[in-house]
Amino acid sequence: MTTGNTATIKRSAGTITRSAGTTRRGFISSLAVVSAAGPLAAACGGAAGSVRKTSTLRYQGWTGQVTLPELAADLGYLGEVKLEWVGNTISGPQDVQSAATGQVDFGGAFNGAVVKLQEAGAPITSVIGYYGSDKQTYTGFFVLDDSPIRTPRDLIGKKVGMNTLGGHSQAVQDLHLRRNGLASGDIGKVESLAVPPVTMEQSLRQGRLDVAALSGIFRDKAIATGGVRTLFKDIDFLGEFTAGSYVFRDDFVKRNPDTVRAFTAGVAKTIEWSRQRPRAEVVARMTAVLRRRGRNENADALQYWRSWGVASKGGVMGDREFDTWRAWLEDVGQIRKGRVKARDLYTNKFNPYAGGGSKG
């Protein structure tokens, strides 16, 4: 079975994708293909369910970045589990869609996208938190120093770039505007654009964007270069939090519990290794990984890495990571109230840093 996934993976690094709708409805329209994966995933389930047990995990990477699983594999923390790279993505929602439809074995995304996908009936479960926001690593919305944009209302009619539509940045933007009193009609006039992270800063400086949502190494690189200022940050009104998780299909977990356990434990251990080692050592290790894999990438941005932003020890998850976005999706009428319970969306039972499981 094929989907439109390949085009997303191979999209040009210079592409800017315009939102089909920039209101709160746009958040869901960008997830429409993901939501549709419910019955689609079920159709694929027969084939996926017939596959034998495996210790090789297919996954998508990110250009110019080293993911936690890739670092875990390099550290030897995955044990006998091997990773098989099948391509790159710039979209968390697309990544978990690929996991839901069996094109890859695991995917990672913003927890709001995971909530929406599971509410639509996709048979997936989150097993570990892998990124978030803290004082060192957060999502900031940046403008040029001489920009006239100062307040939330100034965003009306402006172009805001973010790595994907329907993900972390668009949800944070919507929450920020709502909490500052903007009505739905005004929020709809803020134009959200999907821009590859590697070209986001350049698009802002060239005037193709009015605002750029930047995080991690791309944020720090822009700050170090200078000429930009922060309009607002997610941690300003949400505090420190784990924002995204890795998911597996439920049938894959059932067939391969030991593989999922080894993966989860390895990623958890890598989170803690990264906290305990000097930042320079972590950066050097990731740089070596990126250069060895030979994907024709530039490693310069890795020097700006600060942390994974994971709020808990070893990526252990709690209800809060999902309830913030579940409540928001309910409030804006995009999922039915009471349909989703946070405790049904994730499990900690494979994580060695957890005291017990929360699902299954």
Image (cartoon, rainbow, N blue to C red):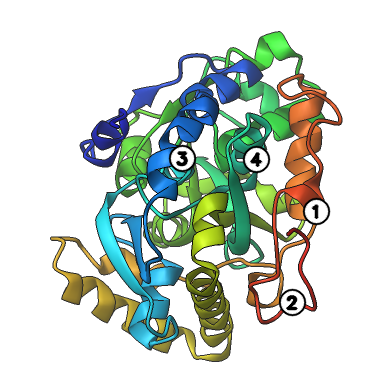
Q: Is residue 298 left or right of residue 159?
A: left
The numbered disc on residue 112 is: 4
Neighbourhood count class around disc 1 (C-alpha, 10 Å): few under 14, some 14–19, many 20 upward: some
Residue at 67%, 39% in the rendered image: 115
- Quadrant in the picture for residue 12: top left
Neighbourhood count class around disc 4 (C-alpha, 10 Å): few under 14, some 14–19, many 20 upward: many
Neighbourhood count class around disc 3 (C-alpha, 10 Å): few under 14, some 14–19, many 20 upward: some
Q: CA distance from mark 2 to mark 1?
A: 16 Å
Dot 2 corresponds to which residue?
354
Q: Position of residue 319 (x, y in %)?
A: 81, 54
Q: Position of residue 281 (x, y in %)?
A: 40, 89
Mark 1 secondary-structure assignment: helix
Residue at 53%, 51% in the rendered image: 251
Residue at 76%, 21% in the rendered image: 332
The nearer-to-camera label among 2 and 3 is 3
* Location of residue 93 with respect to 347 vertically, above or below: above
Q: Nearer the viewer, residue 60 or 223?
A: 60
Most distant residue in the right direction: 338
Dot 3 corresponds to which residue?
45
Mark 2 secondary-structure assignment: loop
The answer to whether the residue labelled 3 contacts the one labelled 1, judged by CB atoms less than 8 Å apart, is no
Q: Position of residue 231 (x, y in %)?
A: 61, 41
Q: Position of residue 293 (x, y in %)?
A: 19, 71
